[in-house]
Amino acid sequence: MDIIDIINKKRLKQELTREEISFAVNGYIDGTVKDYQMSSLLMAIVLNGMTDRESIDLTDIMLHSGDVIDLSNIDGIIVDKHSTGGVGDKVTLVFAPLLASLGIKIAKMSGRGLGHTGGTIDKLESIEGFNTKLSQEEFIKQVNDINIAIVSQSGNLVPADKKIYALRDVTGTVESIPLIASSIMSKKIASGADIIIIDLKVGSGALIKNLEDAHELSRIMVKIGEIYKKTVICMLTNMDQPLGYAVGNSLEVQESINTLKGDGPSDLLEVVISLCSIIVGAVKKISNEEAKNLLFKQLNNGEAYNKFVEFVNRQGGDINKIKISDKVIYIKSEVSGYINRIDALKIGEIVKKLGAGRNTLDDEIDYGVGIVLSKKVGDYVEKDEELLKVYMSDKDVSLNEILDCYKIDKQLDKPIKTILDIVN
């Protein structure tokens, strides 16, 4: 078998066999297939796609390239959640303790942010002392004890995906539905949960830009889940503006705490409650309305927040020590009108420039910087009224760059929806 023949076969839009996909992936891991050869194959896949069978085979080959976690010692149904990445996406920080407060087991391995999207692990590490590295035994014990543990991804969990994704990130081959599906599902299946819920972001600030691609990605992920006897639920949520008001690690943690206390942004709350109610309804065998009522009760009676505090304490964090920059710049609107657009991608890139993101996984980040919006799409703003606050340290951004994120008009456009669809 020859890697050049495999590249040419996919370049000619032909279906690869499982053996050919295995040869390419395993060869890339052991170094016999070089970076430039794998990047050529990845580009051919981006341009010509993959059949369902190819996508399923690729998932399985990557899944078995490293460890597969055994969570059979955890009592009860185990839930995991994945987000395809967005701006201001702190859903996990509310979703996980809220479900855990109802006795549902959350065993989650999360990633760091890269590019303009934030990572759950970075957000948790903005809490002083928080430990994101637990042994498998500690991880399982904690889930059994308090129903929740969130840790950074294991070093040998799906190493093929880790190496291939790093190459995709620097070769313009990220935006491919088969590659995205196999990347997500290989990691989620290797993590061992029974129910996998995927918050699939759609819009200008997301990897997936339109509903057609989002539905196709959802379809193949649900199909892969069925093969492994996993329940996979995809919720398509809007990422045409930041989720909530806060963007930046510590700022997002603080907004999550407020939400767990029953005082969160309406769009964030809508996503969290919608995701959680699906799980609660399925696990507890109750209606969606009953599930939502139960979830709001947990937020209003303090149980969800108390579970978050318990979780943070258990992993060594001090919830009273979350550093937020004290250098704050207030940005005001130059015109009066309705806010019809807030460019999520540009906001994410600005926050990254402030120091909250990284260009490589080894970059140091500034946990305390970011942006807090004062207005959202659909709101009316007066001239000289505050649009947002910028929390900064030693890195500046231009006023014009920030104002360019906004489209403010005399008339209000059609309101944007937060929840776009559910696929299961």
Image (cartoon, grey):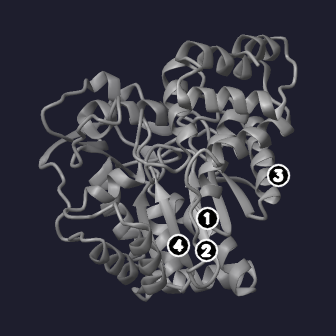
Q: Quadrant of the C terminus?
A: bottom right
Label ID, residue 78: 2
How far across and down, in percent of the image, does residue 316 sit?
Answer: 24, 71
Disc 2 residue crowd, few under 14, some 14–19, many 20+, Cα 10 Å? many
Secondary structure of the residue carrying tag 1 is loop
How far across and down, in percent of the image, does residue 265 sit?
Answer: 45, 61
How far across and down, in percent of the image, does residue 141 sit?
Answer: 43, 80
Disc 4 residue crowd, few under 14, some 14–19, many 20+, Cα 10 Å? many
Residue under pointer 3: 223
Secondary structure of the residue carrying tag 2 is strand
What's the CA distance linking mark 2 and mark 4? 6 Å
In front: mark 2 or mark 1?
1
Query: Cβ–Cβ below 8 Å for labels 4 and 3?
Result: no
What's the CA distance linking mark 4 and mark 3? 23 Å
In front: mark 3 or mark 1?
1
Q: Amino acid at mark 2?
A: Ile
Query: Cβ–Cβ below 8 Å for labels 3 and 1?
Result: no
Label ID, residue 192: 1
- The mark that comes first in sequence, 2 or 4, is 2
- The mark that comes first in sequence, 4 or 1, is 4
Does 9 sit above or below residue 219?
above
Going 55% across and 78% down the picture, which residue do you hit?
Answer: 105
- The mark that comes first in sequence, 4 or 3, is 4
Query: Cβ–Cβ below 8 Å for labels 2 and 1?
Result: yes
Secondary structure of the residue carrying tag 4 is strand
Residue under pointer 4: 106
Disc 1 residue crowd, few under 14, some 14–19, many 20+, Cα 10 Å? many
In front: mark 4 or mark 1?
1
